C-alpha cells in the first residue's frame, strides 16, 4: 500500500515538468525519507542498539573478574641450601641451569658467578607456603661434594636459604591455553613502549578504532597488491583474540570495531594494555598454546620477563605478527631479521638510543628454551593429579592458577630414569618393562617415580596401575610377625626348612618349594629370611597364623583388603610398586605407618595458603622388633639373595632390602632402603609372560644403580634401648663366643638372649 | 586443614609450661610470675626461657662426656665413598646441618609466639626434611601437635624423637613429655 503511495507521489512530482536528473534526485530523496525507509532505518538502528547492548554485556561480564582460565602449576621441591647439604658444585649448577640462571655478574636476580670451588648466586626470591623467600646474594663454598660454607656477600653466615622451585608441569583446561598472568606494573616499561611503537603507535590517542591506520593499511595493501599491513589497533587485536574467531570477514570486522569502541568506553587504556599483554598469542608447544608475555619469556628464554634483555624483549614483540612464521627455533634468520627491523623502528620512535640498538643488534637470538624439567616427568605428575583430584574439582585445577608444591627431586627422578634405561638395555629386551618408586624413608615424601621404560612419555603408569605378584618381597612381614613375639622367636630361633604340605580350605594341598629345589634342614630365622627359603617361611607363617600376619600388614594403612590365604606367605598376593613402597615405608621408618605424600602444599594465584598436607606418623611396630628385622634384611644384601647390591654400593655402605620373584620369573622385584632413600623396583612384561629373570638379576641392578647415584646416607644404626648383642653359632643358633668359628653377633630383645654356656660348636 | 583454636592453644601452652616450670624455677616463683605479670607476659617470658634453654642444651651436648663424639643428638651414619669419607659423614650427621635445623627450631618458637601454629608446624617439618635423623626436629613438631591436642600424632613423633636421641638431656626432656597425662 505504501509502495503505491510512493509511486503515486513521485509520478505526480515527475509530471511537473522538471529535468530528468532532477527527477531522479528527487525520487531518491523521496525513497530515502519515505516513512517506510524511516521505519526500516529505525528498525536497523534498534537492531544495532540491541546488538551493541548484547556486546556491551558480553564485554563487561567477561572483562571484570577472572578473564582467563589459568592452569594449576606444579613445582618440584625447592633446593634448600645450608651447610652440610650433600650436593656437589655441579649438582647445584645443574639446578641453576634448570632455573634459567645465567652466568655473569650477580647484580641481578637469576644470575651466578663460578669460581674454583665456589658459586656466588643472586636468587630470585619466591612466595612459599610458609613465608616469602627474599631474593638474596649468596656465596656457596663446596668441599668434598657438599656445601662447606654458606654466607652472604659480606661474609655473614646464612643458616638456610631456598632457591625457587623448578616448574615441572601444569594442569590444563581442554583448550590447552597456557599463560602466566602479570600485572601492568610487573611488565618492563621498555616492552610496553616497544609494543605501542610497533603495533599501534596511536594507542593512547584513538578510541578503539583508528581510521587513519585503516586507511594507511588499505593504501599499502592496494599498492603492493597483497595483504601486507593490518590497521588493527591493540584494542582490536585484543577483541579479536579474546572474543572472536580468526576468520576474516566484514561481519567480524564490524563486530570487532563495535566491541573495541565499547571496551575503550568502559575501561582505561592501562586495563586494556594489561589484558592485551596477557592475551597475546606467542607460540605453540604441541597442543599447548603459549599466551601472554609472562609465559612467552619462560617459553623462549626460560627466564622471568623482567630479567630479559633489550634484544630478548624485542624478539617477543617480533613474534606477535606470526608466531609460526617467525618461530625463532625453526626460522632463526627470519626471526632475527624481523627483530632487527623492529629495533630500527624503536630507534625511529625514540624508544631506544642508537647505542642500545647497535648493541642489541650484535646479539644473537639468545634463546633459552623452557626448563628441561618441564613436562619431563609425566608419571610423577600423574600421582600429583590423582592426589589433587581427591581435594579439588577439575574445574578449579584448570582455571584458578593454583600453585602446587610437590616433593619431586628432579635429580633423583633423572637418576631413576637413567638407571631403568641403562639396566634394561643391558638385559637386551625391547619389551621388558620396569617401574620405580623412590621415597624418603622417614617422611614418606615421594622423591621420584618411573612408570615405564619410556619415562618421558605419558602412558600406562606401571608404578601405580600394574598389580603383580610380589614374591618374596612379602617375607619381611612374615618374619616381623615372628619377631613381634619375642617370647617365641629371636633371630637365632631355628626354623625347619623341610618340605611342607599345607591343606587348604577347599581341600586342595599346597606344597611350596625352595628356589634351589633343596631343603636346608633347621636354619636360624635370620638365614631363612636372608636366603629366602620358601619352605621355612611357609612353616613359620603357618605357625604364626595367616590372620596374624595379614593383621600386621594391614597396620601399614595400605587401604586394600588382603586375601587371607596360605600362599600369601610366598607372595602370590598382587600389589602395585606404589603399594609395596607403602608397605616398606613402615619398615624403613623404623616401624611407623606414614602415608606417602607427593604434595606438600597448595597456594592460590595470589600466593595465599590454600592447603598444606602435614606430615603424619603413627607407630605401629615395636622398634626393637624392627631393629632385629633390619639386621636380618641387612643379611639379605650382605650374604643372601641381594648380595650383588652390596658389591655395587661398597662394603661400608649399610642398607637393607629384599628380592622378590614371582612364578616362573613373571615379576622381578627389589625393595630396599638406605639412610636417606627407600626404593622399590619392579620389572616384568606387560602381558605377564615369563621373563625367566629373578629379582636379583633384573630389579636389583636398577635399584643399586639408583642408590649409587643418589643415596648419601648409610642406614642408621641406632640400637634401641632394650636390645643387646650376643654371639651365636651360625648353624645352630646356640650361644657362642666371638673367637669361635662360624659365629655371628646378633641383636636380641632383652630377656630373649640364648641361654646356656657359651662355647665353640665347631 | 587443621583449624586452630587460639585460646585453647594458649591454655595448653600455659598448662605445659606451668607444669615444666617447677623443674626449672621454684614453684612460688612461677606463681608469683603468673600473679604479677599475667598469663600473656608469662608466656612470652617462658618462650624466651625455652629458646635460651635450647641454646644451653646445645652447649651441654657439646661439653658432655657421656655420649661419644659421634653419638650426639643425630646418630652416627656412614656413607659410601671410602673410610675417610665415612669419618667426615659421621661428623656431618652430628653437627654440620645443625645451624639450619637450629634456625628452623627458632622459627618454630617464633611462630608459636605469634600463634601461627601451622607455620610453626611447617618450620618443624622443614627441619625434619633437612635432617630426618635429628631428634630435636621431631621433638619440636611433637610439641606443636601437643598444643593442638593431637596427642596420638604427638606421641608417635616423640617415639621417633626418642629413637634418634642419643643425648641424655634430650632423652630426659622427651621422657618427661611422654609422661604427661594426655598421652596415657
Image (cartoon, rainbow, N blue to C red):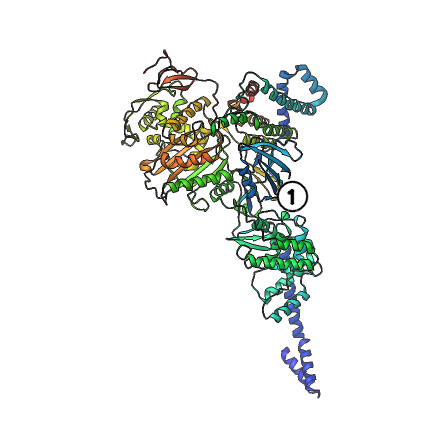
In the rendered image, which residue does mark 1 sit on? A108
Q: Is residue B114 left or right of residue A69?
A: right
Q: Position of residue A502 (x, y in %)?
A: 29, 28
Q: Position of residue A520 (x, y in %)?
A: 29, 24
Pick the residue in front: A620 or B76. Answer: B76
Which of the image's four quarters has the C terminus of chain A? Answer: top left
Residue B1 versus residue A170 in the image, above or below: above
- At 42% from the left and 34% from the top, the residue drawn is A704
| Quarter location, residue A101 | top right
How packed mark 1 is, by other alpha carbons closer than 10 Å (few <14, some 14-19, many 20 or more), is some
Subunit that carries the residue with mark 1: A
Q: Is residue A315 visible?
A: yes
Pick the residue in front: A179 or A371. Answer: A371
- At 39% from the left and 41% from the top, the residue drawn is A424
Instruction: Please tell me how many numbered marks the rendered image carries.
Output: 1
Q: Under tag 1, what secondary structure?
A: loop
Amino acid at each position: 500500500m505504501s509502495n503505491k503511495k510512493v509511486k503515486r507521489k513521485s509520478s505526480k512530482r515527475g509530471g511537473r515538468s522538471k529535468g530528468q536528473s532532477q527527477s531522479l534526485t528527487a525520487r531518491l530523496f523521496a525513497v530515502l525519507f519515505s516513512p517506510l525507509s524511516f521505519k526500516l532505518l529505525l528498525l536497523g538502528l534498534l537492531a544495532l542498539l540491541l546488538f551493541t547492548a548484547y556486546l556491551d554485556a558480553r564485554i563487561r561480564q567477561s572483562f571484570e573478574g577472572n578473564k582467563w582460565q589459568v592452569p594449576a602449576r606444579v613445582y618440584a621441591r625447592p633446593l634448600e641450601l645450608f651447610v652440610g647439604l650433600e650436593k656437589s658444585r655441579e649438582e647445584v649448577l645443574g639446578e641453576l641451569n634448570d632455573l634459567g640462571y645465567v652466568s655473569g655478574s650477580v647484580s641481578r636476580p637469576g644470575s651466578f658467578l663460578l669460581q674454583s670451588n665456589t658459586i656466588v648466586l643472586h636468587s630470585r626470591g619466591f612466595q612459599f607456603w610458609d613465608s616469602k623467600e627474599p631474593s638474596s646474594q649468596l656465596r656457596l663454598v663446596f668441599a668434598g661434594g657438599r656445601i662447606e660454607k654458606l654466607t652472604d656477600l659480606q661474609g655473614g653466615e646464612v643458616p638456610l636459604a631456598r632457591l625457587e622451585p623448578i616448574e615441572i608441569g601444569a594442569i590444563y583446561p581442554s583448550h590447552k591455553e597456557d599463560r602466566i598472568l602479570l600485572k601492568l606494573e610487573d611488565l618492563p616499561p621498555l616492552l610496553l613502549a616497544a609494543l605501542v611503537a610497533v603495533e599501534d603507535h596511536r594507542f593512547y590517542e584513538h578510541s578503539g578504532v583508528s581510521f587513519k591506520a585503516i586507511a594507511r593499511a588499505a593504501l599499502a595493501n592496494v599498492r603492493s597488491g597483497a595483504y601486507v599491513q593490518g590497521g588493527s589497533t591493540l584494542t582490536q587485536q585484543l577483541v579479536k583474540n579474546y572474543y572472536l574467531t580468526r576468520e576474516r570477514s566484514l561481519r567480524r570486522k564490524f563486530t570487532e570495531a563495535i566491541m573495541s569502541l565499547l571496551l575503550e568506553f568502559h575501561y582505561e587504556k592501562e586495563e586494556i594494555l594489561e589484558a592485551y599483554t596477557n592475551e597475546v598469542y606467542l607460540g605453540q608447544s604441541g597442543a599447548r598454546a603459549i599466551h601472554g608475555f609472562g609465559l612467552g619469556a619462560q617459553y623462549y628464554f626460560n627466564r622471568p620477563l623482567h630479567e630479559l634483555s633489550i634484544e630478548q624483549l624485542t624478539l617477543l614483540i617480533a613474534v606477535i605478527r606470526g608466531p609460526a612464521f617467525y618461530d625463532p627455533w625453526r626460522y632463526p634468520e627470519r626471526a632475527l631479521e624481523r627483530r632487527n627491523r623492529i629495533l630500527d623502528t624503536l630507534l625511529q620512535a625514540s624508544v631506544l638510543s642508537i647505542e642500545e640498538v647497535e648493541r642489541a643488534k650484535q646479539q644473537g637470538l639468545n634463546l633459552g628454551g623452557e626448563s628441561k624439567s618441564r613436562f619431563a616427568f609425566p608419571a610423577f605428575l600423574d600421582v600429583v593429579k590423582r592426589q589433587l583430584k581427591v581435594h579439588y574439582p577439575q574445574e578449579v585445577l584448570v582455571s584458578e592458577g593454583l600453585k602446587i608444591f610437590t616433593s619431586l627431586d628432579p635429580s633423583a627422578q633423572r637418576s631413576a630414569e637413567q638407571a631403568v634405561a641403562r639396566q634394561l638395555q643391558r638385559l637386551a629386551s625391547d619389551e621388558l618393562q620396569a617401574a620405580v618408586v623412590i621415597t624418603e624413608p622417614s617422611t614418606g615424601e615421594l622423591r621420584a617415580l618411573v612408570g615405564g621404560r619410556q619415562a618421558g612419555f605419558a602412558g600406562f603408569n606401571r608404578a601405580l596401575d600394574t598389580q603383580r605378584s610380589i614374591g618374596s618381597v612379602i617375607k619381611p612381614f612374615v618374619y616381623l610377625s615372628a619377631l613381634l613375639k619375642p617370647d617365641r622367636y629371636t633371630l637365632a630361633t631355628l626354623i625347619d626348612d623341610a618340605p611342607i604340605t599345607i591343606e587348604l580350605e577347599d581341600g586342595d594341598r599346597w606344597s611350596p618349594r625352595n628356589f634351589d629345589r633343596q631343603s636346608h634342614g633347621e636354619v636360624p630365622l635370620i638365614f631363612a629370611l636372608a636366603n629366602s627359603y620358601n619352605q621355612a617361611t611357609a612353616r613359620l607363617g603357618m605357625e604364626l597364623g595367616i590372620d596374624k600376619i595379614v593383621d600386621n600388614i594391614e597396620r601399614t594403612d595400605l587401604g586394600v583388603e588382603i586375601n587371607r590365604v596360605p600362599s600369601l606367605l610366598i607372595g602370590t598376593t598382587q600389589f602395585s610398586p606404589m603399594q609395596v613402597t607403602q608397605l616398606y615405608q613402615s619398615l624403613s621408618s623404623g616401624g611407623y605407618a606414614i602415608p606417602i605424600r607427593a604434595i606438600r602444599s597448595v597456594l592460590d594465584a595470589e600466593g595465599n595458603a590454600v592447603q598444606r598436607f602435614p606430615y603424619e606418623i603413627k607407630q605401629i611396630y615395636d622398634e626393637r622388633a624392627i631393629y632385629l628385622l633390619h639386621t636380618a634384611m641387612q643379611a639379605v644384601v650382605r650374604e643372601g639373595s641381594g648380595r650383588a647390591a652390596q658389591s655395587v654400593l661398597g662394603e661400608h655402605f649399610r642398607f637393607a632390602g629384599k628380592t622378590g620373584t614371582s612364578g616362573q620369573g613373571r615379576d622381578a622385584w627389589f625393595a630396599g632402603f638406605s639412610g636417606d632413600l627407600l626404593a622399590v623396583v619392579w620389572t616384568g612384561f606387560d602381558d605377564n609372560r615369563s621373563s625367566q629373570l629373578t629379582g636379583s638379576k633384573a630389579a636389583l641392578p636398577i635399584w643399586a644403580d639408583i642408590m649409587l647415584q643418589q643415596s648419601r646416607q648409610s642406614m642408621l644404626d641406632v640400637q634401641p634401648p632394650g636390645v643387646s648383642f650376643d654371639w651365636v653359632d651360625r648353624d645352630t643358633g646356640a650361644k657362642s663366643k666371638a673367637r669361635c668359628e662360624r659365629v655371628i653377633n646378633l641383636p636380641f630383645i632383652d630377656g630373649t638372649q640364648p641361654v646356656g654356656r657359651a662355647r665353640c660348636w665347631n | 586443614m587443621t583449624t586452630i583454636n587460639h585460646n585453647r592453644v594458649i591454655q595448653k601452652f600455659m598448662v605445659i609450661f606451668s607444669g615444666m616450670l617447677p623443674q626449672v624455677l621454684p614453684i612460688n616463683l612461677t606463681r608469683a610470675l603468673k600473679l604479677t605479670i599475667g598469663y600473656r607476659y608469662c608466656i612470652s617470658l617462658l618462650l624466651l626461657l625455652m629458646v635460651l634453654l635450647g641454646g644451653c642444651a646445645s652447649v651441654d651436648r657439646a661439653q658432655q662426656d657421656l655420649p661419644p663424639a659421634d653419638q650426639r643428638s643425630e646418630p652416627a651414619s656412614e656413607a659410601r665413598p671410602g673410610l675417610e669419607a665415612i669419618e667426615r659423614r659421621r661428623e656431618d650427621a652430628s653437627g654440620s646441618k645443625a645451624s639450619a635445623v637450629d634456625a628452623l627450631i627458632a622459627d618454630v618458637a617464633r611462630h608459636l609466639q605469634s600463634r601461627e601454629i601451622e607455620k610453626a608446624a611447617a618450620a618443624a617439618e622443614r627441619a625434619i626434611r633437612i635432617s630426618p635423623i635429628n631428634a630435636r626436629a621431631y621433638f619440636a613438631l611433637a610439641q606443636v601437635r601437643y598444643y593442638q591436642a593431637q596427642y596420638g600424632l604427638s606421641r608417635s613423633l616423640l617415639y621417633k624423637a626418642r629413637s634418634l636421641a642419643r643425648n641424655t638431656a634430650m632423652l630426659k626432656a622427651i621422657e618427661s613429655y611422654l609422661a604427661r597425662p594426655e598421652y596415657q
